[in-house]
Image: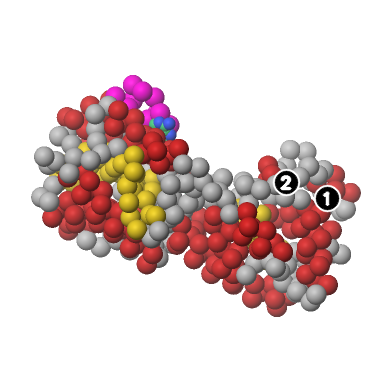
Amino acid sequence: MIKKIGILTSGGDSPGMNAAVVAVARCAAMYDIKLMGIKRGYNGLLGLSDNPEDDIAELNLETVLDIADQRGTFLRTARCDEFKKPEVQRQAAQTLRELGVDALVVIGGDGSFNGAMRLCELGIPCVTIPGTIDNDLGYTEQTLGFDTAVNVCVEAVRSIRATSRSHDRPSVVQVMGRHAGDIAMRTAMATGAEMVVCPEMEWDTDELAARLNGLIAKGNTRATLVIGENCWHKMKEFDWRKFLNDNGKTIYPGEPLNAERLASILKRKCNGIEARATVIGYTQRGAVPSASDSAFAFEAGHLAVQLLNRGIANQAIGLRHGQVFNMPIADALSMKKHFNRELYDLINKL
Ligand code: ADP
Ligand code: F6P
């Protein structure tokens, strides 16, 4: 019989984490299970704060009543490198046992899932909910926060396009996603962007410039290139520093390539067209969760408690064909993420 469960959010915060906490709280209350909120990811299990309440505190329905549509994560989050050490994991499991916490819900990305697996091995039943804007987990169609992040990017591209159109300027827009191009791809499709560059695919500045020149020749002087962060290592070899230095823009050795410099390169390869760059950044993480993320959070939180209450643990919750489902965390993590090459090619040639 489960009497007390813990919940934590870990890794980068993502819209919908709070909604998932509320769903878990409501469902736990329904089963008469106490809920402990663990603060700042796995850090909360390490007894780092002077006041223990700053690490772990009971959550009741009143405490979390109004947080579902709040931005950020109420429980706070962190990247806790210490927790990768086996002795620290053992100490965390011991802390949970001493507090009488029978099981844990972990909301985060693949790193956080790995942490949950280690705790399962140490006898703490865990269920994980995918919380990351990156949508970089192969086993699930959606992660909490992805839909919201895309909506932020779509809104941003629409605004950028309005000013681009006014000035006849193409735009480079950089979105997040870590090593996954999902946010870039979906944003590009939803906004009708003419070009997309993702960290999964090799790309070439000459090809981008040829595409842009072709668009300009047809009268499209406000084209949008959406790029996923971390795409730089996939750029086809090109001495871009020399190119820019030879073409009137000083670049010092060691300076990295970025969206602004890519815009400068395109300007110089496209007859001086005034390409501009925008990096959307953390607004993607700090937005109010969309209806889709909030509804997924509701179902996922509910399923997490149901599983633990039935004694089923070591499970990752995801979405498949629009339905919530669960599978063993290790199997979930071993599923390779599919990159949709056909859509990628389509965006870049339509
Ligand atoms: P995400 O969960 O979004 O992928 P990270 O990769 O930063 O984010 O991981 C979040 C946290 O999960 C880490 O700071 C650490 O506390 C924990 N974690 C990550 N990898 C492992 C691992 N291999 N073993 C145990 N804990 C891990
Ligand atoms: O994983 C979510 C994410 O926002 C990624 O898209 C991004 O690469 C990373 O986190 C940024 O991390 P930090 O908050 O440490 O800057």
Assign a secondary structure to mark 1.
helix
Image position, residue 198 (x, y; %): 63, 52
Kindly identify the amino acid type of the residue bearing the numbered disc 1: Leu
Kindly identify the amino acid type of the residue bearing the numbered disc 2: Met
Decide which of tag 2 and tag 1 comes sooner along the chain. 2
Secondary structure mainly formed by the magenta segment: helix
User: Can I make out residue 47 in this image?
Assistant: no
Q: Is residue 82 within the magenta segment?
A: yes
Does the residue at mark 2 contact the one at mark 1 (Cβ under 8 Å)? no
Quick check: 339 left or right of 119? right
**Closer to the camera: disc 2 or disc 1?**
2
User: Can I make out residue 324 in this image?
Assistant: yes
Quick check: 244 left or right of 153? right
- Taking depth in this image into account, of 54 and 211 the one nearest to the observer is 211
Q: Which residue is mark 1?
A: 244
Q: Residue at x 14, y 41 (%)?
A: 2
Which label was assigned to residue 264? Answer: none
Q: Residue at x 40, y 38 (%)?
A: 331
Asked where in the image residue 226 lies, by quadrant, the reply is: bottom right
Quick check: 147 left or right of 221? left
Image position, residue 7 (x, y; %): 26, 44
Q: Is residue 152 within the magenta segment?
A: no
Q: Residue at x 80, y 75 (%)?
A: 218
The span picked out in magenta is 79-90
How many numbered circles does the render carry? 2
Assign a secondary structure to mark 2.
loop
Image position, residue 309 (x, y; %): 17, 45
Mark 2 to mark 1 CA distance (whole Å): 16 Å
Q: Residue at x 66, y 54 (%)?
A: 197
Which label was assigned to residue 235? Answer: 2
